[in-house]
Image (tube, rainbow, N blue to C red):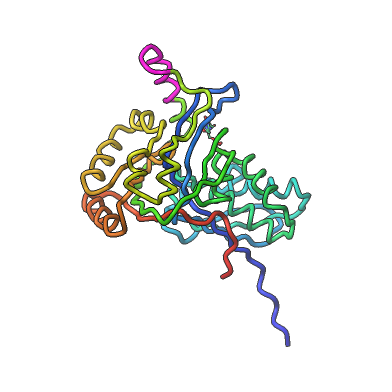
Amino acid sequence: MTSPAAPKVVHARAPGKINVFLKVGSLLDDGYHDLATAFQAVSLCEDVRASAAGDFSVGFSGGTIDASGLPTDGSNLAIRAARLLARVTGYRRGVHLEIEKNVPIAGGMGGGSADAAATLLACDALWGTDLAREELIDLAGQLGSDVPFAFTGGTAIGTGRGDQLSPALAKGQFQWVLALADFGMSTPEVYAELDQHRLRHSQDIFPAEPQPQVDAGVLQALRAGDPHMLAEVMHNDLQAPALHLEPELASVIELGEENGALAGLISGSGPTVAFLAPDLDGALELQIALSAARLTVVRATGPVHGARIVND
Ligand code: C5P
């Protein structure tokens, strides 16, 4: 007697990211900014399990992050990713997505982007649509500026909107300690705050570079795998506007730096603060110190892989 085959489930995983360096150019006519960033994918990952369905739906279960506030309708980026893939390939049915969230929501670490990248990969395998990697990365770019990097992972330089990627050489593993906030921040609001700040102070500050670049020292530090060197050159143009909107984050950065972090930086548009530790022992000590101050803290290492299929 043959038992009925279990319904097919494809499991894909994609990482969150830290922008170890981010320079923002001037505001363009399309509402975006040219930027230059160094991304590092870190070991906080989103797990997406895709199973065949007639329609498109998403649920959240497991994971370390409470996802109860997230939309499950067509505005969810994972659903948009699945629908986009179905549209371009002519696939006529749908998918149910079950997502385990471990990357903070609206935290500046690209959690939604990781969901979208893992969804593209999982649906492509589930549906047998078999697009080339370059085609999937192109679709990723249509979904959001950070989605291509969640797809490729590792350590990379992003230009344009952050979606034009070139791999960066990185040696060894960096130890990160992340202080999570109990609130989210809106990326467009943080960019708008930066634009307003630049307008208000146009007399006193240099105008934004039209084509920003990643400092050579950042590439050198990544290549050397040297956290001390990297700490010296970490930078984020979105940090000042994020701190202007949420001033209490400044004391989080200070606390980490007083407790052994080589440097603390707002990740992306915030509010997560990423601390670079000298080594694993330093990261563990920092985690204990920040937890004792009642902050929500997780450790992560980087770089890690981009989106991939997991064989359960
Ligand atoms: O591409 P994504 O949907 O992630 O971008 C969210 C928002 O972040 C944009 O609507 C824009 O306000 C801002 N953004 C920007 N310049 C970039 C990337 C994002 O102004 N290069």
Residue 67 appears anywhere in the view: no
Is-magenta flag for residue 202?
A: yes
Of residues 154 and 117, the one nearer the viewer is 154
Residue at image coords 40%, 41%:
267
* Residue sitting farthest toward the top: 203
Q: Quadrant of the N terminus?
A: bottom right
Place residue 264 in its image quadrant.
top left
Of residues 293 and 263, the one nearer the viewer is 263
What span is colored magenta in the figure?
193-206
Instruction: Residue 302: give x, y in percent of width and height.
Output: 43, 54
Residue 278 appears anywhere in the view: yes
Of residues 48 and 265, the one nearer the viewer is 265
Place residue 44 in its image quadrant.
bottom left
Instruction: Residue 208: give x, y in percent of width and height.
Output: 46, 22
- Please say if 269 is above or below 18: above
Residue at image coords 27%, 47%:
261
Q: Quadrant of the C terminus?
A: bottom right
